[in-house]
Amino acid sequence: MGKLIYAANTSLDGYLEDETGAFDWSVPDEAVHAFWNEHERGIGTSLYGRRMYETMRVWEDDDWLTDQPAVVREYAGIWRDTDKVVYSTTLDTVSSTRTRIERQLDADAVRRLKEGSDTDLSVGGAILGAEAFRLGLVDETVLLLCPVAVGGGKPALPLGVRLELELLDTRRFDNGVVYVRHAVRHAR
């Protein structure tokens, strides 16, 4: 059975994006990118909201990758090899392989996906992630805390939901990023 993992880069003060929608402060260096590559290898299905999918689908295109470091090109292959479910009421089609659209997040359907999976699943995006937390679907969090405080923006964790967590792992990167992994014991 697979676990549903909420994974994100976040500012130290807990935001995915700043108040202008920027997240350039979270662009990974080579070591952090290699960490994400290793993490994503264990993911068989990624659940995305529309906006997160539109951000991530750049990995489908090879044109911009030719001058990128090997670790970046490697991530593109990992992303393409992962099944993707996009939850959207506005998208009619998707432009990446191994991708399908669902109109709403159905808790029972996600539970069935987890039960039938030999690999873990991930949920990405603040809105879809918050909904998955509220529905009690998230089993673990993987957060990379970037050494910046942005003062506001889109929260990394859902507002109005109390999460009781158990620390499973930590790591410090040379660039000041800190990885923390928690099991979600209870969400209410």
Image (tube, rainbow, N blue to C red):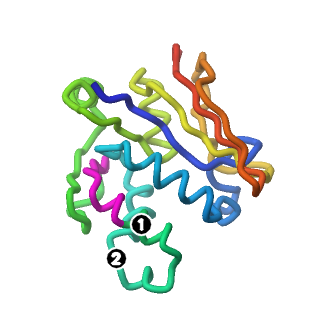
Q: Which residue is mark 2?
A: 61
- Disc 1 crowd rating (10 Å Cα; few below 14, some 14-19, many 20+) is some
Q: Please, what is the three-letter code of the amino acid marked with disc 1? A: Glu
Q: Is residue 68 left or right of residue 106?
A: right
Where residue 82 sits: x, y (%)?
29, 52
Q: Nearer the viewer, residue 137 or 67?
A: 67
Is residue 150 something one can see in this rendering?
Answer: no
Say whether marks 2 and 1 touch (CB < 8 Å).
no
Where residue 160 sits: x, y (%)?
60, 25
Q: Which of marks 1 and 2 precedes in the sequence?
A: 2
Tag 1 secondary structure: helix
Q: Please, what is the three-letter code of the amino acid marked with disc 2? A: Asp
Closer to the camera: disc 2 or disc 1? 1
Q: Nearer the viewer, residue 44 or 174?
A: 174
Q: Residue at x 66, y 59 (%)?
A: 26
Q: Nearer the viewer, residue 62 or 94?
A: 62
Mark carried by residue 34: none
Up-down: is 35 above or below 184? below
Task: Name which quarter of the figure residue 175 lies in.
Answer: bottom right
Mark carried by residue 74: 1
Q: Residue at x 19, y 28 (%)?
A: 116
- Disc 2 crowd rating (10 Å Cα; few below 14, some 14-19, many 20+) is few
Q: Quadrant of the N terminus?
A: top left
Please provide the residue range marked out in magenta: 77-88
Where residue 101 sits: x, y (%)?
22, 51
Is residue 160 something one can see in this rendering?
Answer: yes
